[in-house]
Amino acid sequence: MSRNNVKHCLVVLILIAELLSVLIATGSPQPATKSGLQTKQAGEPQIWRPCGSSVAGGPEGPPMAADDVCTSYSKLRGPITDAAVQDPDRYAWQTFCELNQPAPGKTRERVWQAWANQFDVYVSRPDPKHPPTWEGATTGASRREHFENRVELVAALRAMQGGQDSSTTTSTTDTSTTHSGPTPRYDADECDPNTYQQIFFNRPQFDYIVDNHLWYVEGQIAAFDARKTIDFPTDAMVVKALWRPISEAEKPKYLWTVANENTQGSSSTSLKPQLFGLASFLFISKIIPTWTWASFEHLDNPCLGRQEAPQDNFGVSTTGQPSEALLAMFRKFHLDTALWSHYRLGGIQTSYTDTTGRPIILGNSIAEAGFQTTSSCTNCHGRSTVGPLTTGKFFGAGRLPIFSGFYAGNFRPQSANGAADPSLYTDYSTSPPARKYQQLDFQWSLACANNTGSDSNPCSPKGK
Ligand code: HEC
């Protein structure tokens, strides 16, 4: 077989695998079809009243009825001995403050900004003989800030997702309505105002990825072949920061930064120094086995509270008033109360479902624009896997697909939510059951790694 034929076969195989996994993923009952969960709104069956969610919210969202909060932690009784487990909203704000306080010895740089950017870990043309070092990633001359344009990233993810946006893809519920041009529930692009993104790893996260050879695709495949369990240490953390261009006048209400040509990840030469404000801030921490998933938003985010009311029992009330406890926390960490009062906790996810089994929904209005009402940080990230067909040539190729499929009335691919589906990972139809995919401990970023000697991955700014 010629090289081209091999390549062609591989692509076809990958497409079949992707299609199969979509079919498998969508074979399980979707929330929209579960009885008793449907909303009364006609024509929008996919909105089935997710926890804490509202379609009618103003900038702060409507006051949440007790039943809207899908968490067993909201009504606290007795002492708090571990905030992350027993009082997650307090833990989310506490961690937000710790991460956003000035880095030691710095005035403008924040703690997380001194960590390692993912592209100084998932380097282009990786050479296993020369692994990245923490010093190189955080202080070296080659360190870059790597601002990724989200429009480009999202387009790349879509294009590389085995054609999930194409007409060949199956629909979750009703094919006749999903592809005949229904009006989307809302204009998701309007929620994502020219945003740029950065991902930073703390030292334990960085060390685990490098020490276990997960920073290049062949290392991940070797882990699969060796049946090595991927299990990050309990102090591992990742930050995903979303920035949008702001004006000089907006500076007092934003954490801001200036990104110039040198700090941009893109190879474009036309970039000028630009003022950016922190629009969204997502952090994850391995403090529990399924990680904690926190989403913060700036008050000016166009779709804040529009699809999903913020869920915050600690920091900011539904009327938009920061609590005394939060203000005290800001002061403790040397954070300007006037500036930081412009940020809101969207919510923190610490489990797949509530105590009755209802899926917990959490999405950031920018990062999850277009699928916020089906978004489950935990479930979607649990699909980050390595499998027998992983090649790394395309984002996510040979891994479980990012999205579970489509819902009637919305042509945008949607997130899986609720409990994880064991049959995605193991084939129980054989005896003994066979392994299909191995989880990568919730780290989607690992799909951004390049193949040895290559820079083909779309997450990675080319040639840097
Ligand atoms: C439908 C799937 C999906 C959902 C839902 C989702 N993410 Fe992600 N997330 C991704 C993908 C894909 C990436 C990697 C691409 C990128 O850089 O954005 C990612 C990247 C990240 C990263 C960078 C580190 C890593 O593991 O890749 C963080 C942190 C993160 N997401 C947090 C969250 C949080 C918090 C939520 C919920 C509020 C969430 N995500 C919801 C798919 C999802």
Image: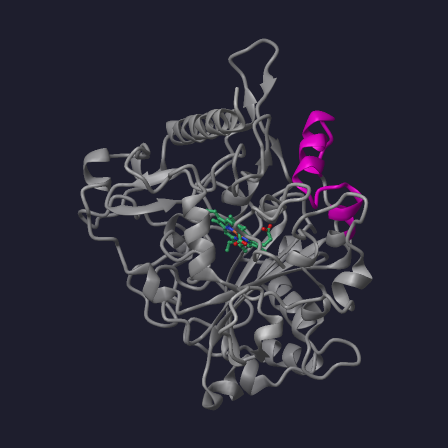
- Residue 306 in view of the camera: no
Report if residue 215 lies within the magenta region: yes
Question: At 73% from the left edge and 45% from the top edge, which residue is drawn?
Answer: 232
Q: Where is residue 65 in the image (x, y as percent from the top left)?
A: 38, 59
- Along the horizontal axis of the image, is 237 left or right of 34? right
* Depicted 33 relative to depicted 59: above or below: above
Question: At 51% from the left edge and 74% from the top edge, which residue is drawn?
Answer: 271
Question: At 45% from the left edge and 31% from the top edge, which residue is drawn?
Answer: 18
Q: Position of residue 353 (x, y in %)?
A: 50, 42
- Along the horizontal axis of the image, is 427 left or right of 24? right
Report if residue 195 lies within the magenta region: no
The quarter in which the C terminus is drawn is: bottom right
- Residue 437 in view of the camera: yes
**In-front residue for pair 78/364:** 364
Residue 359, quarter of picture: top left
**In-front residue for pair 7/427:** 7
Query: Where does the magenta region start and end?
Result: 207-230
* Depicted 186 relative to depicted 431: above or below: below
Q: Where is residue 137 in the image (x, y as percent from the top left)?
A: 75, 62
